[in-house]
Amino acid sequence: MPSWAELPIGQVVRLDADPDAVALALDPLPDDAPAVVTYFAAEERSVADLAASVLRELDKAAIALFPAWLPGAEGIEGPSGVNVAAVQALARGRASVTGHFGPFLAELARRALTGGLSGLAPEVRAAGLVRVLADSFGRARLAVLVRVPDGLGTAARDVLVAGCEWLAHRGRAGVWLAGAPLDDDRVRTIPAPLPAPLGGVPEDIPPAVPLPGTADRAPAVAYPPVAGRPHPGSASEQALEAALSSRTWAGGRAWNQTYRPGPLAVPIRVDLLWERERCVVEIDGPDHRAPAKFAADRQRDVLLQLDGYAVLRFSDGQVLTDMDTVVRQIGQFLRNRRRAEG
């Protein structure tokens, strides 16, 4: 079985694994893995349409992750002329020492502050976005994990494979397909480097109830968080950080940290951590009701608890609709821990 580092870059392959198991194995990103962005494919009429869809979603991710890919731009916010000039100068300077294409990076930095669409060619954008997204996570390479939906017809499968080949070649990204079978001779199937399966996966978990108005808004792309920041794609993490920022008792918190229970243990990524108080806060979206993820959550909670951590779990819905209660309960726990420690 290959390691994550041995999976091909610049090619399209199909992973012989359940996509949910792959997602669990990549959270947190293994040390030897490239940065991985997940694209939830839909039926497209042409290769050009698919390429446009992928680039649009990768572009959104890059803008959301700003300034992780542009060192020195931290704290520069707002579309003023001074700010735009500052980030463009930083982008040109970074391009001159890293090999990024300067005009692309400068344009992306400007759009991170002002919005708007790119005027550059798709081939330029593909190569630039792949490098920027890899940089955001401190990795030299990027893979796009494409989740293939069920029910694609022959023509749609041909479009998907051809579009993925375009992205792999133009962007120099690894493109890893997972999900529904493709039955396409152009794509070879390889094993995924997954850990041993979890035991005791429950099968009777009730389905998650989506927030009002969100049932049909599945994201087209997903990507890891950047350590130290709320996930830019998570409205609940952003909202909780905004609520905590004005509370003096909330000091010492750290978002999206990787914790290793022991030297040989599998690392655990936690949403929000107070290390001194040994408190972990997790915010669960509907995907946490899937049996494999539910079981993985229970296992990691036990490992954290055995190491002295309390794990406080809230749903997206609780955070977004009853913030006062969530903040009050977190604050009560932290104050109790601090009193107990003297």
Image (spheres, grey):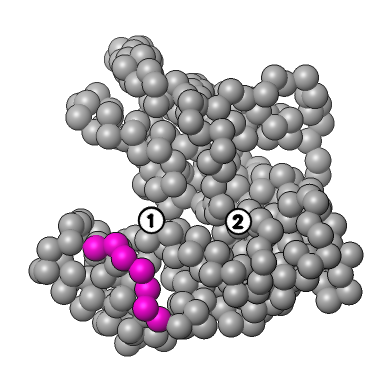
When asked about the image quadrant of residue 165, the answer is bottom right
> Quick check: 146 left or right of 84?
right
Residue 1 showing in the rendered view: no
The residue sitting at 60% across, 75% down in the picture is 48
Instruction: Give the label on residue 38, or none.
Output: 2
The boundaries of the magenta stretch are 114-120
Dominant secondary structure of the magenta stretch? loop
The residue sitting at 41% across, 34% down in the picture is 236
Instruction: Give the label on residue 337, or none.
Output: none
Percent position of residue 35, x then y: 56, 63
Percent position of residue 174, x then y: 65, 71
The answer to whether the residues at label 2 and label 1 have Cβ atoms under 8 Å apart is: no
> Quick check: 174 left or right of 130?
right
Q: Is residue 316 above or below residue 227?
A: above
Front in this rendered view, residue 194 or 169: 169
Percent position of residue 71, x then y: 30, 67
Task: Please identify the quadrant where the N terminus is shown.
Answer: bottom right
Task: Please identify the quadrant where the C terminus is shown.
Answer: top left
Percent position of residue 293, x then y: 68, 34
Q: Is residue 6 above or below residue 341?
A: below
The residue sitting at 37% across, 73% down in the picture is 118
Query: What SS does tag 2 mark?
Result: strand
Q: Amino acid at mark 2?
A: Thr
Q: Is residue 51 highlighted in magenta? A: no
Query: What SS does tag 1 mark?
Result: helix
> Quick check: 315 left or right of 262?
left
Marks 2 and 1 sit apart, C-alpha to C-alpha, by 15 Å
The residue sitting at 18% across, 69% down in the picture is 84
Q: Earlier in the sequence, mark 2 or mark 1?
A: 2
Instruction: Give the label on residue 64, or none.
Output: 1
Classify 10 Å Cα crowding around label 1: few (below 14), some (14-19), many (20 and above): some
